[in-house]
Amino acid sequence: MAVALRKISPWRFVRAVQVTHIPTLKLHMTGSMMGATVEQFNHAKSQMGTLKEDPGNEAKLKIYALFKQATQGPCNTPKPGMLDFVGKAKWDAWKSLGSVSQFPVCIKNGPPPKRHPANLTQLWKALESTWEDARQQYVDLIDSLLAAEGPAVAAQPTGSAATFDTLLVSTEDNITTIRLNRPQKKNAITVEMYNEVIKALEQAGKDDSVITVITGSGDFYCSGNDLTNFTKIPEGGIEQMAKDAGELLREFVKAFIDFPKPLVAVVNGPAVGVSVTLLGLFEIVYATERATFHTPFSQLGQSPEGCSSYTFPKIMGNAKASEMLLFNKKLSAVQACAQGLVTEVFPDSSFQTEVATRLKAYAKLPRNSLALSKQLIRGTEKERLHTVNDQEVERLVERWLSDECMQAIMSFFQAKAKL
Ligand code: COA
């Protein structure tokens, strides 16, 4: 198949898609929150024309298949003959997204007739959600191809040290490294650092690196939210502070959920709070044996964030996740690895060199293939993660205003109560 595909113009699929219209789609729009809108889909379609590089046959087949699925639903055309290699490859790709036999004949051909309206409407909704889902996947795929190509305009500096005050950001050997750089405060995350990480991730998502690493300076990976963030009360009072902090946290976590390339955490020491909860959104977590993983939310009168209320039970099961998220259990690196939160633990003495060797090899892998595969693995639950993020932030904003939380923060600063 690959040989046959190479014989045709690399852009032939793309061009075919660009001139295809989607006349019936608008008739069935529901404005569902689940998938991309028709506008987003059309925008992605027009963006595809700006791709500078041929995304390769595999990606083009996927684009073709998603387009057909998004505009016509499950494959309903006869299988091309054996010798029509290209036609068959396209048909196979479309067919692989879902068989028409999953849908009753009556809804293959149009909206539900009057008979059995309840049942048929339900089935019709299933078909609509297939379209929406395919539209979303199509939009995500084009976004990730564009992101993998880098910015359309001249590259922005990816963060020489001068660009950021709280981070060191550099790109080398196809790896962009974002280093939290407040070692004297154990890399606690201030408002400024939250904003800078969002910006650094945005740049890393668009630069020409293959993978992105997050790590810490000094002996800590990160001690979580900087508790002094709670002491800077704005004019609008404490409610305004909680609201602003919630908005910032939402955007911060969103930047991780939407990050288009493989993300690697190089956990160089103890990790606390949000720096731990986010780990469920990374592709790889490497830890020194000295690292610990601690989420002391109830101790601080708070509640989990970073989508951990969803990712942790999924990764380690409810019982172990509850020990961490409800009962503040601090895990050693070896325990965290056994629970599936950490990919691999290294001796502290060789941690940096072993991880660097590993990552340099990974960063030589094809960029598009990695980005697309990440998208396949994460794509189906992206929407879910955004919903979880919203819910967690909503709960935390309430918590930050609670007496339990105020007391805990005051005792940290007054009595220097440590974890
Ligand atoms: N927010 C604000 N300041 C923090 C901080 C945080 N999350 N973590 C560390 N710091 C500050 C300390 O107050 C200290 O400041 P100082 O030098 O001005 O006194 C400095 O960083 C060094 O920390 P220190 O406590 O001396 O180091 P340690 O190794 O003895 O203890 C911790 C490290 C992380 C166990 C301890 O600082 C701590 O418990 N921090 C709070 C962590 C936390 O509650 N995070 C929020 C989770 S949701």
Image (cartoon, rainbow, N blue to C red):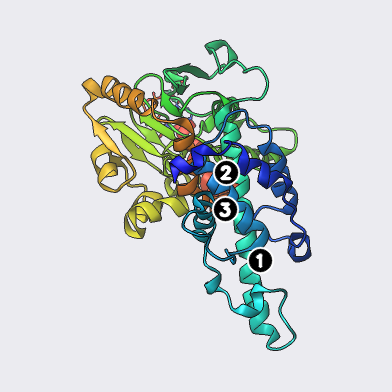
Whichever of labels 1 and 2 marks the residue nearer the N terminus, that label is 1
Relative depth, front residue between 166 and 139: 139
Whichever of labels 2 and 3 marks the residue nearer the N terminus, that label is 3
Whichever of labels 3 and 1 marks the residue nearer the N terminus, that label is 3
Residue 401 in view in this figure:
no
Identify the residue at the far front of this view: 83
Residue receiving disc 1: 128
- Give left or right: position of 399 versus 277: right
> What label does residue 181 carry, if any?
none
In the rendered view, tell whether residue 183 sits above or below residue 400: above
Image marks 2 and 3: residues in contact by CB distance under 8 Å: no
Relative depth, front residue between 403 and 167: 167
> What label does residue 65 carry, if any?
3
Secondary element at image label 3: helix
Image marks 3 and 1: residues in contact by CB distance under 8 Å: no
Relative depth, front residue between 417 and 134: 134
Residue receiving disc 2: 141
Relative depth, front residue between 403 and 126: 126
Amino acid on which the number 2 mark rests in the picture: Leu
Amino acid on which the number 1 mark rests in the picture: Glu
- Give left or right: position of 49 versus 93: right
In the rendered view, tell whether residue 22 sits above or below residue 397: below
Separation of residues labelled 1 and 2 (CA atoms) = 20 Å
Identify the residue at the far bottom of this view: 115
Secondary element at image label 2: helix
Queried on whether the Cβ of the residue with tag 2 lies below 8 angstroms from ligand 1, the answer reads no
Check disc 1: other Cα within 10 Å, few if <14, some if 14-19, many if 20+.
many
Percent x, y of residue 197 = 55, 28
Percent x, y of residue 219 = 34, 22
Separation of residues labelled 2 and 3 (CA atoms) = 12 Å
Q: Residue at x 54, y 37 (%)?
A: 259
